[in-house]
């Protein structure tokens, strides 16, 4: 009953086999192999336009390099207060952007609102040099609260960013889960709604170590080559990242895995609907659930081997919780089975 994170799950067998296949023979290095080029072409097909693809090893690297590519002196990057770039990346985005600052913004369910974003940008008038200048906006899809921005919500945030002449980045560590939840296409959820650059994650959804930066305007990709090299993210044997994505996309595996983990989350949610010891804190739009649980039930689950994290509750939610309750986070994965979920619910 491993619900701590989808990072705990291993690699899907098809992806592991693709790595074994790629291990034989010789291939040109630094992203120039036939396999690298084929997978880059696949990304363009998936997004229905020519894109520039940069393989990296971690989501932190992808996010940090994306924001660094927008660098301005005194730069201010606008994000949700709970965004991964703000709370879980050890100042890497600021470090790689050589001094840019993150401007955290509150918002319910892990989402930025257009009004809150516009107000935050407005705090940095262009003629006030002491405050720095707006540099970029970043949103997370699916969010750190397990919710997903709708297409209209993404477009509305893009409108605010574009009016301020700011590029819009999407942190897609759980991109496939949000896509499967919305039932839309990669193009519709990104560049057709105003996304300029995407951190495309595969590691949480069955890959071993596969992340990519996707630039929707290849004409702006030149500096990224140098940024990636300088950050030590240009892998000589990058074909091993390409090999993972090659299997990931074959026959729609990536979406099958995301749909499965989302279905496991939905199965959990159905169980909580009839529980008298735990309840969903809010509806989910991915494979993450946040649950208010009675402390004795939480202890019983942990005693039986269930693994999950306690989570800090915000002021509004905390006001509705009893003293004997805790907020926890549960994350399902491609490797989870219905039996895992049902065992958890049975103990609950």
Image: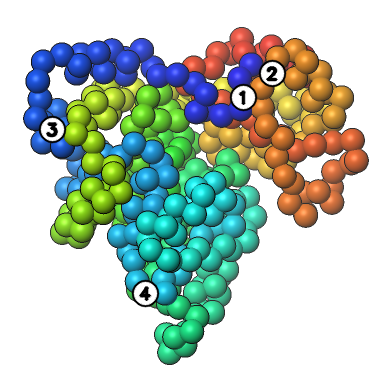
* Occupied quadrant, residue 307: top right
Tell whether label 2 touches label 1 (CB within 8 Å).
yes
* Occupied quadrant, residue 330: top right
**Which residue is disc 2 drawn over?**
306
Residue at x 42% of width, y 57% of height: 95
Residue at x 9% of width, y 30% of height: 28
Q: CA distance from mark 3 to mark 4?
A: 35 Å
Q: Which mark is residue 3?
A: 1
**Which residue is disc 3 drawn over?**
29
Q: Quadrant of the N terminus?
A: top right
The kind of secondary structure element at disc 3 is: loop
The kind of secondary structure element at disc 2 is: loop
Depicted 294 relative to depicted 122: above or below: above
Say which label, 3 or 2, has the lower sequence index. 3
From the image, state whether disc 4 or disc 1 is nearer to you. 4
Say which label, 3 or 4, has the lower sequence index. 3
7 or 343: which is nearer to us? 7
Q: In x, y percent, where is residue 164?
A: 40, 75
Say which label, 1 or 3, has the lower sequence index. 1
Q: In x, y percent, where is residue 325?
A: 84, 36
* 37 sits to left or right of 279: left
Q: Does residue 183 appear in the picture of this structure?
A: no
């Amino acid at each position: 009953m491993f619900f701590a994170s989808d990072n705990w799950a291993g690699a899907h067998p098809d992806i592991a086999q693709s790595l074994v296949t790629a291990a034989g023979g010789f291939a040109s290095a630094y992203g120039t192999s036939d396999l690298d080029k084929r997978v880059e072409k696949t990304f363009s097909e998936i997004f229905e336009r020519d894109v520039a693809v940069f393989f990296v090893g971690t989501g932190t690297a992808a996010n940090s390099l994306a924001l660094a590519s927008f660098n301005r002196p005194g730069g201010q990057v606008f994000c949700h207060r709970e965004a991964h770039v703000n709370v879980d990346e050890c100042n890497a985005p600021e470090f790689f952007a050589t001094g840019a600052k993150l401007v955290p913004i509150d918002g319910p369910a892990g989402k930025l609102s257009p009004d809150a974003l516009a107000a935050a940008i407005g705090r940095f008038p262009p003629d006030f040099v002491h405050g720095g200048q707006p540099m970029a906006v970043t949103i997370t899809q699916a969010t750190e609260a397990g919710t997903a921005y709708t297409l209209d919500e993404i477009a509305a945030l893009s409108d605010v960013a574009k009016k301020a002449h700011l590029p819009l980045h999407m942190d897609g560590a759980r991109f496939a889960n949000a896509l499967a939840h919305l039932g839309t296409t990669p193009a519709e959820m990104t560049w057709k709604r105003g996304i300029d650059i995407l951190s495309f994650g595969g590691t949480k959804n069955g890959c071993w170590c596969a992340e990519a930066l996707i630039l929707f305007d290849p004409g702006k990709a030149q500096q990224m080559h140098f940024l990636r090299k300088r950050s030590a993210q240009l892998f000589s044997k990058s074909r091993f990242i390409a090999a993972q994505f090659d299997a990931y996309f074959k026959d729609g595996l990536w979406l099958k895995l995301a749909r499965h983990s989302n279905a496991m989350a939905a199965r959990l949610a159905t169980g909580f609907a009839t529980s008298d010891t735990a309840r969903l804190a809010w509806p989910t739009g991915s494979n993450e659930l946040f649950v208010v649980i009675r402390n004795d039930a939480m202890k019983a689950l942990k005693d039986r081997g269930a693994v999950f994290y306690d989570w800090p509750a915000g002021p509004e939610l905390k006001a509705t919780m009893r003293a004997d309750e805790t907020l926890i986070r549960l994350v399902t994965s491609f490797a989870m089975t219905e039996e895992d979920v049902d065992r958890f619910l049975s103990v609950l």
